[in-house]
Image (tube, helix red, strand yellow):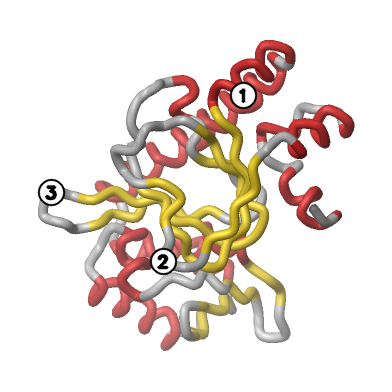
Amino acid sequence: MGFVDRQVVMKAPLFSALDEESARGLLDSMTPHRLARGESVFHEGDPGDSLYVILTGKVKLARSSADGRESLLAVLGPGEMFGELSLFDPGPRLSTGHVVSTTELVSLGNDALRLFLADHPEVAMQMLAGLAHRLRRTNEGLSDLVFTDVPGRVAKALLDLSDRFGRRSEEGLHVAHELTQEELAQLVGASRETVNKALADFAHRGWVTLGAKSVTLLDLERLHRRAR
């Protein structure tokens, strides 16, 4: 594994509380995976037997309704961890992990992880802190669905994506989110038509420039105001 990959993965709660030697040993014991867009890491209902840390690429976590509609719960990128809920609450997967772009990740089975945590309880505390942060974001998302209109939710989603995937360019903050229009609408929790209308309005106002599976944020201040 290259230096950059190691630097990225060390940001995950699983590693951030460890010294370099312990972190390197744990990482070397994990199983590497490489998946292409459209492939799945796991499916809703599968046994929850391991966790994953993303090295490169993006993974979306989604749930499906009985009639086949899909709700996008989150889009995760390098350094982020997922699948660890099953360690603390054994049971089937509650979501499906779809690969958004070619992704490299590493996994660790729950049995091996439990043995590791027995010797490194500080890592368990970091993982619980990570879960608490995710729960807080989920609660905020539920509140947004009730109290915030669609344009406000679109602005908030763009800002959230820019925090993890944004890169400075001459124009502004370029966000290669690699989501289709439908996936972006699922993330916001609204129809594609309503989300597209909000994006077109933002572009007309000069707040963003729209691209193919990307967006460049030009006026962060106004987007933050609209997201409130």
Q: Does 197 appear above or below 127?
A: below
Pointer 1 or 3: first along the chain: 3
Q: Does 177 appear above or below 48?
A: below
Which percent across, then down, holds residue 183?
35, 67
SS for dot 2: loop
Comparing 62 with 172, the one in front is 62
User: Pointer 2: what residue?
Assistant: 38
Mark sitting on residue 66: 3
Amino acid type of the residue that numbered disc 1 sits on in the rendered structure: Leu
Density class for disc 2 (Cα within 10 Å; few <14, some 14-19, many ≥20) is: few
Amino acid type of the residue that numbered disc 2 sits on in the rendered structure: Gly
Comparing 135 with 1, the one in front is 1
Pointer 3 or 2: first along the chain: 2
Amino acid type of the residue that numbered disc 3 sits on in the rendered structure: Ala
Density class for disc 3 (Cα within 10 Å; few <14, some 14-19, many ≥20) is: few
x 34%, y 51%: residue? 62
Which percent across, then down, holds residue 10?
76, 42
| Quadrant assignment, res 27 | top right
Farthest residue in the left direction?
Answer: 67
User: Pointer 1: what residue?
Assistant: 113
Comparing 76 with 110, the one in front is 110
x 60%, y 34%: residue? 108
SS for dot 3: loop
x 41%, y 32%: residue? 48
Q: CA distance from mark 3 to mark 2?
A: 21 Å
Which percent across, then down, holds residue 7?
80, 49
Q: CA distance from mark 1 to mark 3?
A: 34 Å
Pointer 1 or 2: first along the chain: 2
